[in-house]
Amino acid sequence: SDPQITSQAGAAFFDAFETEGLLWAPMGFPGGGLNRIGAGPAVLLTPKAAMAESDLLPYADAIKHGARMIHVANTLVPTLAHEAQPASVSKAVIQELLRSEMGFQGVVIAGPVDTIDISTRYTPSQGAILALQAGADLVYLHGAGIRAVRIVGDIVAAIRKGELDESIVNAAFKRVLELKKEKGLVDRPIPEEKDAKDIET
């Protein structure tokens, strides 16, 4: 409820994670995630003219502070897009607001594309393809396993059918790869399962 305090907390988290060599991503862009009734989707109702000093302020400060990844949520954005579509699949949110107006050139994570707040409109594969078309670089899934494999297959099929421009996927891959190189993650060996369990404890 207090954008200034949220911004300060975000900066503190960023610095703490950076000290430990961990990437940090502000979640829930462009805001409004708590504005929901029951199990219905969250809806951002702030007028666009008022967003810079409210919902968007913590994200703008995070970008200035050096955030290299931002998560775009499934929040409906009727004040930003012509249709009340989820932010995670909206060009108005990802390309126009986040990238063009706010100047964010890092990695955009969108979704999750397999939860009820988006599945009432699209299948997970449709959501993933729309998110990529809207400017996302990574697609976030709530589930895993065969669903993820199926989505990847459907993305490949969409490229082959000309429904998704391959250059979009290549650009997303390049942004992710550049971030991994910047953080020294490309040549780092994949962690062993036992190491992951040690970190958990």
Image: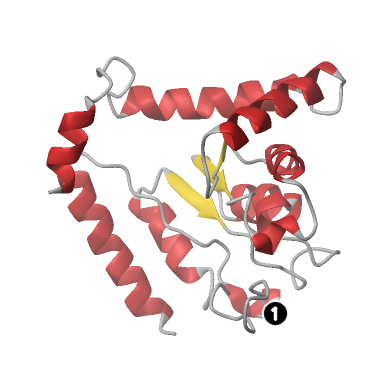
Q: Residue at x 55, y 24 (%)?
A: 173
Q: Residue at x 23, y 29 (%)?
A: 193
Q: Position of residue 90 (x, y in %)?
A: 73, 53
Q: Position of residue 65 (x, y in %)?
A: 34, 54
Secondary structure of the residue carrying numbered label 1:
loop
Q: Position of residue 59 (x, y in %)?
A: 47, 62
**Which quadrant of the figure has residue 157?**
top right
Viewer-nearest residue: 26 or 200? 200
Identity of the residue furthest to the front in this view: 146
- Is residue 150 placed above or below 21 in the rendered structure? above
Viewer-nearest residue: 62 or 122? 122
The amino acid on which the numbered mark 1 sits, given as a three-letter code, is Pro
Left/right of residue 189 with respect to residue 199 in the rendered view = right
Q: Which residue is mark 1?
A: 47
- Is residue 2 placed above or below 131 in the rendered structure? below
Viewer-nearest residue: 62 or 29? 29
Q: Position of residue 10 (x, y in %)?
A: 32, 64
Q: Residue at x 50, y 39 (%)?
A: 107
Left/right of residue 10 with respect to residue 33 in the rendered view = left
Q: Residues within 10 Å of mark 1 (few under 14, many from 20)?
A: few
- Quarter of the image with the N terminus is bottom left
Q: Residue at x 53, y 74 (%)?
A: 55
Q: How many numbered marks, from 0 up?
A: 1
Viewer-nearest residue: 25 or 42? 42
Left/right of residue 32 with respect to residue 41 in the rendered view = left
How does the figure colour the protein chain or chains?
A: secondary structure
